[in-house]
Image (cartoon, helix red, strand yellow):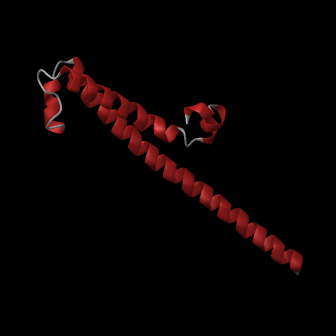
């Protein structure tokens, strides 16, 4: 009887671990997809407007974004936008065990 109970408990434990693993994977896919969509927005909007010379459009999204004559402030804003895109994509990548184990300094 004790053997049957042990096997039942092991079966429940395995089933629970499997369900938890699937839930974590589903959460990661949803979260990472959201991050990719946001990073795409950052890159596409800001990159395209910067290349086309339409940085004045940034003021529609960032009311105090680009300020004429404020070279340093504009540089800092551009650096912030670039880093935001990198971190938005790079952040979730460190949650992937294969990447985390092969490149611990990435974290």
- Say which residue appears at 61% left-offset and 60% top-offset: 20
Most extreme residue toward the left, as rendered?
68
Q: Quadrant of residue 19?
A: bottom right
- Say which residue appears at 65% left-offset and 32% top-offset: 102
- Say which residue appears at 47% left-offset and 35% top-offset: 90
- Counting the numbered discs, the total is 0
Tell me: 50 left or right of 80: left
Residue 42, given in percent of the width and then of the height, sits at: 30, 33
Residue 100, given in percent of the width and then of the height, sits at: 61, 37
Quarter that holds the N terminus: bottom right
Residue 6, given in percent of the width and then of the height, sits at: 83, 73
Most extreme residue toward the bottom, as rendered?
1
- Say which residue appears at 16% left-offset and 28% top-offset: 66
Q: Quadrant of residue 104?
A: top right
- Nearer to us in this view, 77 or 45: 77
Quarter that holds the C terminus: top right
- Nearer to us in this view, 7 or 80: 80
- Nearer to us in this view, 60 or 40: 60
Residue 36, given in percent of the width and then of the height, sits at: 40, 38
Q: Quadrant of residue 85?
A: top left
Tell me: 43 left or right of 91: left
**Image vertical order of residue 95 relative to residue 80, above or below:** below
**Image vertical order of residue 31 relative to residue 78, above or below:** below
Tell me: 57 left or right of 78: left
**Image vertical order of residue 26 relative to residue 37, above or below:** below
């Amino acid at each position: 009887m004790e053997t049957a109970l042990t096997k039942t408990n092991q079966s429940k434990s395995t089933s629970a671990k499997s369900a938890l693993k699937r839930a974590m994977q589903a959460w990661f896919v949803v979260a990472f997809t959201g991050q990719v969509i946001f990073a795409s927005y950052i890159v596409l909007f800001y990159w395209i407007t910067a290349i086309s010379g339409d940085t004045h459009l940034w003021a529609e999204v960032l009311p105090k974004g680009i300020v004429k004559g404020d070279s340093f402030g504009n540089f800092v804003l551009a650096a912030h936008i670039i880093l935001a895109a990198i971190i938005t994509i790079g952040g979730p990548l460190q949650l992937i065990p294969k990447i985390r184990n092969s490149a611990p300094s990435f974290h």
